[in-house]
Amino acid sequence: MKNRLLLLIPIISLFISCSDDITGLNQDTKNATSVPANYLFTNAEKAMMDQVTSTSVNFNVFRLFSQQWTEVQYPQESQYDLTGRKIPDTHWTVYYRDVLRDFKEAKDQLVASKANFVGSPSEAKALDNKIAIIDILSAYSYGILVDTFGDVPYSEALDILGHPQPKYDDAKTIYVDLIAKLTTASHALDQTNGSFGSADLVFQGNTKKWAKFANSLRLRMAINMADVDAPYASTQVLAALADGVIAAQADSAYLVYTPNQPNTNPLYVDLVASGRNDFLPADTFVNKMNTLVDPRRAKYFTEYPVGSGNYKGGIYGELNTYPNFSHITPTITAPAYPGVLFTYSEVEFLLAEAAARGIAVGGTAETHYNAAITASMLDWGVAPATITTYLANPAVAYTTAAGTWQQKIGEQSWIALYNRGFEAWTSYRRLDFPVLKVPSVTFEDADGPITVVPRRYSYPGAEETLNATNLNAAVAKLGSNGTSKRIFWDKF
């Protein structure tokens, strides 16, 4: 009995000595409860770039959809299986949760700091520049979501408390608003002052380059709208051009990764560090480049057989044996190889398209077409003399190449957009060139067996549980949740 009393005494003493206030027990004394705006911006910028760069079939299958690449022993994503790995869910979540939400919180902090700002005039301008850059990248990210799905949450998005089940806004309305916000943001940038500095992984805070990026994005979005509202598209193209777009390779938008994980290029993680051989260049793509004797083949693929000077793509959408074909060049699998948001070559292809549509952008479709191909080849290290020879090839030269302007520009931009699967897929959907093939075996979607190259992602399965009413309204407007349904600008 005595021993039991001795054990109870310290326990009783502990209760007597404690305060009645136990609220402090709910405080996390080790982890940060708020994150500075610069860190949120960096995190969102990297997540945004990783998503568009990755080739993991859990994240990004656009290189497969554009038939630049195909798969080896597991071809289901090349056969349009989007639900087996919940690919739309991941794409949606990355942009809303990891990108846009962090951008919003960073902007909220910056806007709040303006209320009691006590810094120098230069620091005040840098603060406004940061807000404008966040608006630019938020517009880019929402544009990706619209181009992927169609109508998406926008006006009520990211407001978890006020709108836990946000409505889906009209895709065209979102586009027009995004172009307006890009215009406002590009005009708001004070190009004589800095912004995020080293926290900006793309332009290191260079506001002149951010303005050109914003205007180039306006150009791309306006061209996307050319088939649904030609007068509006023309006005916006000319306005973006007047404000100043990317006009040299030095102004292209890249994120340079680091040599060491976890900040290496996702392609290195997917293709090298994983120890897997899951992807090959697709025969659709390689055969076209073989026909044109395109000198970028040596930059894009390995030879097959080695030393032969020949290139052979894996059969798109079929089982392939890895050793029997050309492989992805080691260049783009290097750990520090940059991710790409926008290049000068792409701007020139957009201007070629604008000129072909009759928009007075200066120059001709042919001059911009040649400039675009030249910029792409120089970017990949092709010698100038070789470029001249390629442009003189009757199958390449704008005046003699086969087909309409859509075919000429569509096929060459597809080649130049190598390793940029999303934009290659978008260009294909807008121009309907090149001609892509549907695999002999495909999966099913909401409309049954898939018989065409997908024009969109189906909406995420999680939305059926979390936001069913608004999802169902969007699906009803679209006609179904099938992948053959077209984004609003994809008219033909």
Image: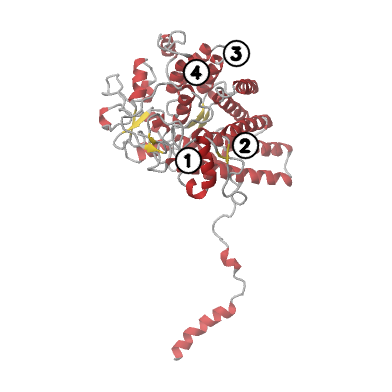
Query: In the rendered image, is residue 380 in sight?
Result: no
State how far apart marks 4 and 3 are (Cα): 15 Å
Q: Residue at x 47, y 84 (%)?
A: 7
Q: Which residue is mark 1?
A: 459
- Tell me: residue 36, above or below residue 474: below
- Say few, some or many: other residues with alpha carbon within 10 Å of mark 3 (under 14 / 14 to 19 / 20 or more): some
Query: For residue 79, which quarter of the picture?
Result: top left
Q: Which badge, 4 or 3, is on the more N-terminal residue?
A: 3
Query: For residue 139, which quarter of the picture?
Result: top right
* Residue 339 coordinates in the image, percent (x, y): 47, 33
Q: Which residue is mark 3?
A: 362
- Say few, some or many: other residues with alpha carbon within 10 Å of mark 2 (under 14 / 14 to 19 / 20 or more): many
What's the amino acid at mark 1? Tyr
State how far apart marks 1 and 3 are (Cα): 40 Å
Q: Which residue is mark 2?
A: 135
Mark 1 vs mark 3: in front: 1
Query: In the rendered image, is residue 350 in sight?
Result: yes
Q: Which badge, 2 or 1, is on the more N-terminal residue?
A: 2
